[in-house]
Image (tube, rainbow, N blue to C red):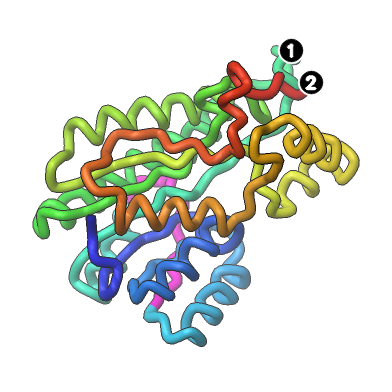
Amino acid sequence: MINLNGGVVIVTGSASGSGAATARILVERGSKVVINYSRSVEKAELVAKACRESGGDVIVQRGDVSVDEDCRSLARAAIDRWGRIDGLVNNAGTTQFCAHHDLEGLSAADFQEIYAVNTIGAFQMVRAVAPHMEKTGLGAVVNVSSVAGIYSIGSSLAYIGSKGALNAITVAMARALGPAIKINAVCPGYIESGWHRKAIGEEATDRMVAHIKSSTPLQSVNTSEDIASTVVWLLEGAPNITGELITVDSGMGLLRGGMPARS
């Protein structure tokens, strides 16, 4: 466990959604936070403003996690400001929507772009922060993955593969980097954040939400705050837990493999 009160945490992809919610909760716990964005500095600054208004000590740092030097720059920004890194949340992610049966709908470049952010980016961030965590002998990493990598459902085959790979390296890195660093993954189901509505439309999203609520044991869908709360628990609590994939899906996994793939 790390002490979030005064601890330093980097949250990638924290200009919106679950990343922004995570940054806000961390600040409430007394953490110093690096807020990261790749495109929208305006959104990142709004998150930072809200954190500062609640008394938080944050910095905003641009960085594309698919670029190794950007990952190292994020780590340097934290060290230059606060002299330590205690936690890392690999929240940055991307996808492309493509029906699973449409094998011509994805190119090798599509796979490479999605893997570069979702899988390689997370690895590069761990590599950038690991030496600093090892100095203190106590660090925690949470990779924000997806049930896509467990149940083989989701926006595209490339996305599924990238999250499955992220899950696999989460376990492998946890084995390799303990005891100084614990590494776990949160695997959300659908998150009601507005993102799906923009991507696939209101009607398709409403149908998906209705199906989740009618079929899962808890009959509910995730909010960004639900995911953020689980991430923060894995950082500051969860004693003796590492290398685990924590599903947050209202019990979808109890339905023998989850929901069928959306066509």
Depth order, front residue of 102/144: 144
Residue furthest out toward the front? 217
Q: Which residue is mark 2?
A: 263
Q: What is the quadrant of residue 189 in the picture?
A: top right
**Is the residue under label 1 in contact with that under label 2 (CB below 8 Å)?**
yes
Q: Residues within 10 Å of mark 1 (few under 14, many from 20)?
A: few
First to last magenta residue range: 58-69
Which is more N-terminal, label 1 or label 2?
A: 1
Please state if 32 lies on the left or on the right of 255 as rendered. left
Residue at horizontal 58%, vertical 20%?
Answer: 152
* Depicted 32 relative to depicted 169: above or below: below
* Amino acid on which the number 1 mark rests in the picture: His
* Residue 241 location (% of width, % of height): 27, 41
Label at residue 255: none
Depth order, front residue of 101/225: 225
Please state if 34 lies on the left or on the right of 163 as rendered. left
Q: Which residue is mark 1?
A: 101
Residue at horizontal 70%, vertical 40%?
Answer: 219
Viewer can see residue 197: yes
Is 67 magenta? The answer is: yes
Q: Residues within 10 Å of mark 2 (few under 14, many from 20)?
A: few
Which secondary structure lies at badge 1?
A: loop
* Residue 133 location (% of width, % of height): 17, 55
Q: Alpha-carbon distance for marks 2 and 1? A: 8 Å
Residue at horizontal 45%, vertical 41%?
Answer: 186
Residue at horizontal 71%, vertical 19%?
Answer: 260
Please state if 69 lies on the left or on the right of 14 as rendered. left
* Depicted 5 relative to depicted 239: above or below: below
Viewer can see residue 109: no
* Amino acid on which the number 2 mark rests in the picture: Ser
Depth order, front residue of 86/189: 189
